Amino acid sequence: MSARTTESRAASPLQLALFWLGIQAVWGALLGISLQARTIELATGNALLAYGRLATAGAATAAVVQVLIGIWSDARRRQRSRRVEFYVLGAVGGAVALAFFYNARSFSALIVSFVALQAALNVAIGPYQAIIPDFVSTERIGRASSWMAALQSAGNAIGALAASFIANARALGAVLGGLLLVTCAVTSSHARTIPVRETPAQAPLRVTRPFVDLFLSRAFVYVGFYTLLGYLLFYVQGVLQAATLANARLTTGILIVSFTIVGAAGAALAARPSDRTDKRLVATLGGAGFIIALLLFIVSHGLAGAVAATVVAGIGWGVFLVADWAIACRVLPAGAMAAAMGVWNLAIVLPQIVPPALTTWMLAHFSLAAAAVAPRAAFALALAETLVGVIWLWRLPRSLIG
């Protein structure tokens, strides 16, 4: 029996991807709901400005840690490591940091715990992104990737639901931390018992103009996405005038879960066109849907309008993600794909820094931070950011992306 056949039977895409469920549940709870809600509870000044400082500090930490740990884990991999030590360290550290985050009694403590959480989880995330090429044969990468995408959506939905319905902060932290540890244990145990693929020969990473254009396009679109996600609770509380913070949390969680579910439908719709049509066109249609949704958010005054905007945004986002990945597989250099994917992922990490920093500056500069229009202004900025990203995508040559 060949080594490839043994690997094919031994490696379970579900078990390899399960840790992604736990990680994404944490982000689903924090980035859309808990980070904003805890800021409102603990910040002594303007909550929008305080949220901007908190989110910026956390995302900056994530960017630095992920790059440094990624380099270290690649070196360990060449020494036959399975990278499991990084998964375990990140999960344990993340569970501890979650407990401190949900038990924080001051805004300073909240900042420290969130920075620690970002550092811990990104110790795991950087090495974990290489788990498919580490253990899955080339002909099965598509199936394994589909499990990663499915469990990412499921994790985001679980986290948003947990943050919406579990009112006790300590209980919420325990649930998220427990899920993180359990999923890490399943994935780590499986990774220890299956054949690891041969370490690929190192190849220099060449940063070409198409690589840069793809990176910038993706970064601008994700800046728009994280601006919407980051200020959605403030929109629900201020524009939709939720009666209490608990009601605002619940409504925001329902909107995020709806966005996630509808996004899966959008991804299914885009699968075949991404293979048969100009991928830039498919990505543009998805981005256009997201832009229309932001317009609906801006002009809406009630929950019905926000729900309609959420549905349109979810479909557009799902379409964009499929085309985005398809383009990357054509543009990124095959001889250095792992390193290229690590750099490419910074187009998601870095945009987590820009929205709170840029939006905070805009609201403060134009004296809008205390105004009821502040969330609408944030969404208008998200619209402009997304539009730039979609337009930038057309700098890629048609002959390169297929």
Image (tube, rainbow, N blue to C red):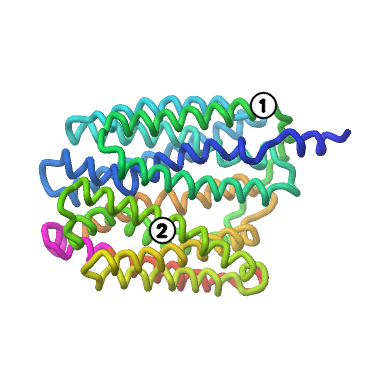
Cβ atoms under marks 1 and 2 closer than 8 Å: no
Q: Which mark is residue 71?
A: none
The relative height of residue 114 versus residue 331 in the rendered view (above or below) is: above
- Name the residue nearer the viewer: 31 or 306: 306
Q: Residue at x 62, y 49 (%)?
A: 145
248 left or right of 125?
A: left
Which residue does the image show at 74% across and 47% down from the upper left? 138
346 up-or-down from 68: above or below: below
> Residue shown at 45%/32% (left/top)?
179
On the rendered image, what quadrant is the C terminus found in? Answer: bottom right
Disc count in the image?
Answer: 2
Q: CA distance from mark 1 to mark 2?
A: 42 Å
Name the amino acid, label 2: Phe
Foreground of the two, 256 or 375:
256
| 187 drawn magenta | no
The residue indicated by pointer 2 is 259
| Mark closer to the observer (1, 2) | 2
Residue wearing tag 1: 79
Q: Amino acid at mark 1?
A: Gln
Secondary structure of residue under mark 2: helix
**What range is drawn magenta here?**
364-378
Q: Is residue 61 left or right of residue 377?
A: right
Q: Position of residue 63 (x, y in %)?
A: 42, 43
Q: Position of residue 125 (x, y in %)?
A: 50, 38
